[in-house]
Image: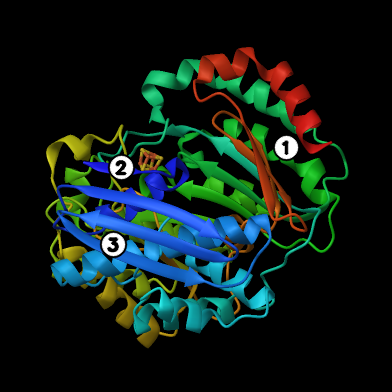
Amino acid sequence: MFTTNCSFLENELLDVVRLFHQKPENITHSFDYKEGVFFNNFQIDGRAFSFVDGGQVCDELTFKRLERRFAKLRLYEILSDLYGEKMPWGALTGIRPTKLAYREIEEGGDFQKLFEKMHVSKKNIQLVADILKAQEGVYLKGDGNTDLFVSIPFCPTKCAYCSFITAPIDKTRHFLPAYLNALTKELASIPESVGNLRSVYVGGGTPFALSREELEVVLKGIAPIYEGYVPKREYTVEAGRPDVFSEEKLQLLKDYGVTRICINPQSFSDETLQKIGRKHTEADIYRAFEMSEKYGFDINVDLIAGLTDETPDMFVESVEKAVATNAENITVHCLSLKSGAKLKEEIDYLENDFISTMVSSSREILSKNGYVPYYMYRQKYQVGNNENVGWTKPGKACVYNVDIMEETANNLAVGANAVSKRVFTDKGLITRHATQKDLKTYIENVDINIEKRKEFFK
Ligand code: SF4
C-alpha cells in the first residue's frame, strides 16, 4: 500500500518503486516545505526515514523540480540500501537524461555532479557526455525551428511486439485512397513559411508498404514545402521492412530529393524474424542494402534487444552484421511492451538480465567500430532499466532524431495519429496537438484537423 500527502508526487514515487525487483508492502510518505527547505518523511514496512534538503528559497518552477528530485532521490536511496540494488540510471526516472543535462548546463551547473548525486552509474554519465558531444552542431534550440512529420500508418503485417496503431495493409488498404487524399489536403494547407524547416520525416508504419504510385502522391504533397527551404538539411523516408524494398521506390525517393532512408531489420536471425511475425529473412535485409547502395542515401538501421528467445550471443551477431552493412546510423532499442503488443501477453521478460548484457555488448561493438552515441531515450515499459541509443558515424547524426528527443524544435505532424508539438524555448513549455488514431475518423475529420492545426501553430 502506498500513501502520500502530496498527490503530485504519487506517480513519481511509484516509478522509483517499480525500478526494484523487491518491493515494500507499505509506504507512507509525507512532504513539507518551509522557507527553502524540503522535508521528506517515509515509513517503509514499519521503519521511519526523515530527510531535510535544500536551503534556498526558489521560484515556482525550480520548487516543482526540486520537490520531485529530492523525494525521488531519498526514496531511491532507502530502497537501494534496503534491497542492495543499484540502478544504472539511479533515481532518474520520467525525464530524458540528456534534456536534464542540457538544462543543468544552461543554468550554469555541472550535469556530471548532478548525475553523481542522483546515483547514475559512471558508464551512463559518460554516455550522456558522449551524446552531448556528438550533438554539437546539430542540437539547436530556438523558437521557430520546425520539423515536418508525415504519418503512414500502414504495414505489411503486424509485428508481435508492436503497440502502434498500424494494421496489416491487407485489412486497411481500402482506406488508402481516401487517406492519401486527406494527407494531400493537409500538406497543401501548410503555410509557405513554417519557420526554419530543419528536416522532413516520412514515418510509419512502413511507408514502403505503399506502391510506387501511392508513395508518389505523398512525396508530391511534400515537394512544395521542402523545395522552398535552403539549405536542404535532411529528408528521411522510413522505408521500413526489407521485404517491401524495390528499385522503383528507391528511384522515386531519389527523384524527390530524399537524403536518408531507414532499413529496419530489428534482428538478423531468421528464426527470430519468424517468431516476431516478420515476413522477411536475413537475405532480404542484404538485398535491401544492395538495392539502396547506388542511390547514396544515408541509412538508419534499427535493432531490438530482447526479442523472443534471443540470447545475448544472437543479439551480438545481429549488431555485428548491422555494423558490417556500413550503415550511417544504428539504433539499439530495448524491447518495450506496451498494452496492445501481443508479446506482452505471451512472455514475461521483465526479469530478463539478458537485456543489460545485450546493451553493454552493443555499446562495446559499436564504439570499437567508430560509431558514437548521439541520441537516447528511455521508455516506461522498457524491459530492464535500460535505454534506447542511436549510434552514428561521426558527422552523420540524424537531425530529426535529435530534434525529437531533445524537444528543441516544433513538430508539424500530419496524417493519422500524428502529434504536433509546439516548443516555446524561452518559457520551457511544450504544447501538443494530436489527430485521430483511427483511419476512418481521421479521414472524416480532415478539414477540422486542418483548422485546429492552423490555430495551434498561430
Ligand atoms: S513495422 Fe513497425 S510499425 Fe509496423 S507492425 Fe512492425 S513494429 Fe509496428
Q: Is residue 192 left or right of residue 433?
A: right
- Identify the amino acid type marked 3: Asn
- Identify the amino acid type marked 2: Thr
> Which sits earlier in the primary sequence, circle 1 or circle 3?
1
Residue 218 image point, x, y percent: 65, 35
Element type where label 2 sits in the image: strand
Q: Check whether the beta carbons of the residues at disc 2 and disc 3 lie within 8 A of each other.
A: no
What residue is shown with label 1?
220
> Which sits earlier in the primary sequence, circle 2 or circle 3?
2
Distance between the alpha carbons at the discs numbered 2 and 1: 56 Å
- Identify the amino acid type marked 1: Lys
Judging depth in this view, the residue of 307 and 140 nearest the camera is: 140
What residue is shown with label 3?
385
Residue 34 image point, x, y percent: 55, 60
Judge whether 422 appears above or below 59 on screen: above
What residue is shown with label 2?
3
Q: Is residue 283 visible?
A: no
Q: Is residue 52 left or right of residue 348?
A: right
Nearer the observer: mark 2 or 1; the answer is 2
> Which sits earlier in the primary sequence, circle 2 or circle 1?
2
Element type where label 3 sits in the image: loop
Q: Check whether the beta carbons of the residues at disc 1 and disc 3 lie within 8 A of each other.
A: no
Distance between the alpha carbons at the discs numbered 1 and 3: 43 Å
Q: Is residue 222 visible?
A: yes
Distance between the alpha carbons at the discs numbered 2 and 3: 25 Å
Nearer the observer: mark 2 or 3; the answer is 2
Judging depth in this view, the residue of 48 and 394 nearest the camera is: 48
Element type where label 1 sits in the image: helix
